[in-house]
């Protein structure tokens, strides 16, 4: 997610393999982790869940083992590494939000730019939280596919919200 500057209610967790930023309610493992073939939000949910079970977790590696792990659902394996070097392998499955991403309310940008930004933002959010609305407002002098900055607000089905400011140069995130 080069060029994106998340702020607000993000739990920042450094992980490898394209996973990394995403809200969560469980403290992530002390060490790194990785995900294969999973969007950031699904990745972070599985890392958080696996890290919460055994004490002394230092690393969690998750991998999707079905055709697709996305907002709708998925399944795979996690390998949890403990402080003493022992590893625990587990499987996971989740049912996410089967509804399509709502059409975002856009201000100050073309609909295709807005939808691209909405999709990249949603990929970083927990798939088990239903999304009810997305609003995106350009905060730069202009927002195009090549350059811009925008405030993004996502409202979940439980009434909670996620807010971030995203900036991009070269291509929409």
Image (cartoon, grey):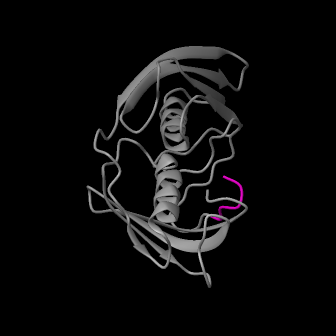
Residue 165 placement: quadrant: bottom right
Instruction: Identify the residue at image location x=63%, y=46%.
Output: 20
Q: Residue at x 35, y 41 (%)?
A: 128
Residue 158 is situated, as x and y percent measured from the top left of the image, at: 26, 56
Residue 37 against residue 109 in the figure, above or below? above
Task: Identify which residue, 166 or 144, lies in the foreground.
Answer: 144
Q: Is residue 123 left or right of residue 147?
A: left
Q: Height in image: 144 above or below 17?
A: below
Q: Quadrant of residue 15?
A: top right
Q: Nearer the viewer, residue 54 or 16?
A: 16
Closest to the observer, 34 or 133: 133
Q: Name the residue at 66% across, 23% down.
A: 81
Q: Position of residue 153 (x, y in %)?
A: 43, 68
User: In what quadrant of the picture does the C terminus appear?
Assistant: bottom right
Q: Position of residue 42 (x, y in %)?
A: 48, 37
What secondary structure is the stretch in magenta mostly built from? loop
Query: Would residue 109 be seen by someone viewing this image from the given angle?
Result: yes
Q: Is residue 136 above or below residue 20?
A: below
Q: Is residue 3 magenta?
A: yes
In the rendered view, would you say 44 is above or below 122? above
Q: Is residue 6 left or right of residue 17?
A: left
Residue reaching furthest bottom? 141
What segment is highlighted magenta in the picture? 1-5
Counting from the top left corner in percent of width and height, residue 43 is at 54, 36
């Amino acid at each position: 997610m080069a060029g994106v500057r998340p702020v607000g209610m993000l739990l920042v967790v450094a992980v490898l393999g394209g996973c990394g930023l995403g809200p969560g309610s469980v403290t992530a493992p002390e060490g790194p982790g990785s995900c294969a073939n999973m969007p950031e939000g699904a990745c972070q949910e599985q890392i958080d869940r696996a890290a919460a079970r055994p004490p002394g977790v230092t690393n969690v590696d998750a991998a999707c083992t079905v055709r697709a792990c996305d907002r709708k659902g998925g399944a795979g394996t996690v390998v949890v590494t403990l402080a003493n070097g022992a590893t625990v392998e587990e499987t996971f499955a989740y049912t996410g939000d089967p509804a399509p991403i709502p059409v975002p309310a856009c201000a100050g940008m073309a609909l295709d730019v807005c939808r691209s930004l909405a999709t990249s933002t949603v990929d970083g959010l927990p798939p088990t939280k239903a999304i009810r609305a997305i609003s995106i407002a350009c905060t730069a002098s202009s927002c195009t596919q090549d350059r811009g900055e925008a405030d993004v607000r996502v409202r979940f089905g439980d009434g909670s919200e996620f807010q971030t400011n995203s900036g991009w140069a070269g291509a929409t995130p």
